[in-house]
Amino acid sequence: MFDTHKSFQNMYHENELTLGLHIPLENYQMSAPTMEGQIELAKKAEHYGFTALWLRDVLLKDPNFLDPAVGQIYDILIYATHLLSQTKEIAIGTSALVLPLRHPLRLAKEVATIEALFPERLIMGVSSGDRRADFHGLGVEHATRGRQFKEALDVFERALYEKYPVIDSCYGRIDQATVVPYTNQRIPTMITGFSQQDMSWIGEHGDGWMYYPQGPVQQQQAIAHWREASEPFLHSTFRPFSMPMHLDLAEDPNEEATGIRLGFRVGRNKLIELLEAYRSIGVNHLFFALFDGQRPAEDVMDELGEYVVPHFSPLSKR
């Protein structure tokens, strides 16, 4: 299915690991990011061989939410388009589009437009969402987000990939009409977390699975569960596993890994060993969030780009 999709082929190969970065490229910790210099840093990430930049879908600033950050502040798809227009080949990933909060027909139009303007550069993570303030602000029932996620994904994919579909759902009716621009290339769609579904459903409907950061032992168990669930539906396409990881890169390259919020503080040499462990258990793409680091994000990117990325670069750059 994705044998010729340039971003998928750059990022995902069985038994291989590539690296990405989470926007914003800042060490803002628990405050709001400034969003300064992001385009220059995105170009630098592309130069070093990071394969993707990932964005979050956050609508409202909610001081009561456990994670008070507001993503990249700007709307996920508008900012994705801006990043795509300023770079040449690095993929943009959504981590993740909250389907119950987006009308699937409107989303199909937006995604089809991005695909037409920047072919094969979008990797689409989708989820059911967890920020109650966003649900309440849009008047969407939070408790039924699992059912809404399934229906929204079905309507979205039929509207995006079928010509003149007949669709009758809670989102409206389509009959004798079709979305333009039309795309004949499926956009890789990664289910994020469980999205209120069971693993069998995820195995059937996801082009890949993205799960939250865990240590290698726990993550190996999650990956084994994913592989078992997806095996009956593999057809002819390898379906990858992705994960984020918060990183506080120590100045001492040999500092051992210690746990931080959603990731590790570690020196670069021990980081390479840790990444090899993740590769060996089946992680195919890992993207660093530099939010909680003690050092300037640009300095960390330079060190990663010089010493770490070459060990996990895409096949096209080896």
Image: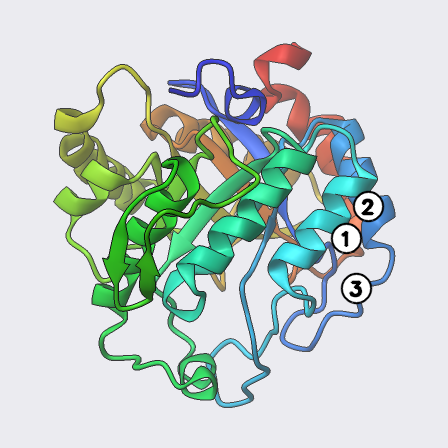
Q: Is residue 139 left or right of residue 59?
A: left
Residue nearest the viewer, comparing 287 with 95: 95
Q: Name the quadrant of the C terminus.
A: top right
Q: Quadrant of residue 132?
A: bottom left
Identity of the residue drawn at 39% across and 32% down: 283
Q: Is residue 33 above or below residue 293?
A: below
Instruction: Give the numbered dot on residue 167.
Output: none
Label 1 residue SS: helix
Residue at numbered disc 3 = 35
Q: Tell me residue 292's x, y (percent).
A: 63, 63
Assess disc 2: are there few (<14), some (14-19) or many (≥20) residues with their C-alpha within 10 Å of its C-alpha.
some
Q: Tell me residue 44's x, y (percent).
A: 82, 37
- Disc tally is 3
Label 3 residue SS: loop
Residue nearest the viewer, comparing 85 with 12: 85
User: Tag 3: residue type?
Assistant: Met
Assess disc 3: are there few (<14), some (14-19) or many (≥20) residues with their C-alpha within 10 Å of its C-alpha.
some
Q: Is residue 124 above or below residue 90?
A: below
Q: Tell me residue 119's x, y (percent).
A: 63, 29
Considering only order in the chain, which callout, 2 or 1, is on the residue closer to the N terminus? 2
Instruction: Give the numbered dot on residue 41.
Output: 2
User: Tag 1: residue type?
Assistant: Ala
Identity of the residue drawn at 68% across and 70% down: 73
Residues at discs 1 and 2 in contact (Cβ within 8 Å): yes
Q: Which dot, 1 or 3, sits closer to the camera?
A: 3
Instruction: Work out how far the residue at label 1 is from the one at label 2, CA to CA, in angstroms.
Output: 9 Å
Instruction: Work out how far the residue at label 3 is from the one at label 2, CA to CA, in angstroms.
Output: 11 Å
Assess disc 1: are there few (<14), some (14-19) or many (≥20) residues with their C-alpha within 10 Å of its C-alpha.
many
Residue at numbered disc 1 = 297
User: Tag 2: residue type?
Assistant: Leu
Q: Tell me residue 205's x, y (percent).
A: 25, 40
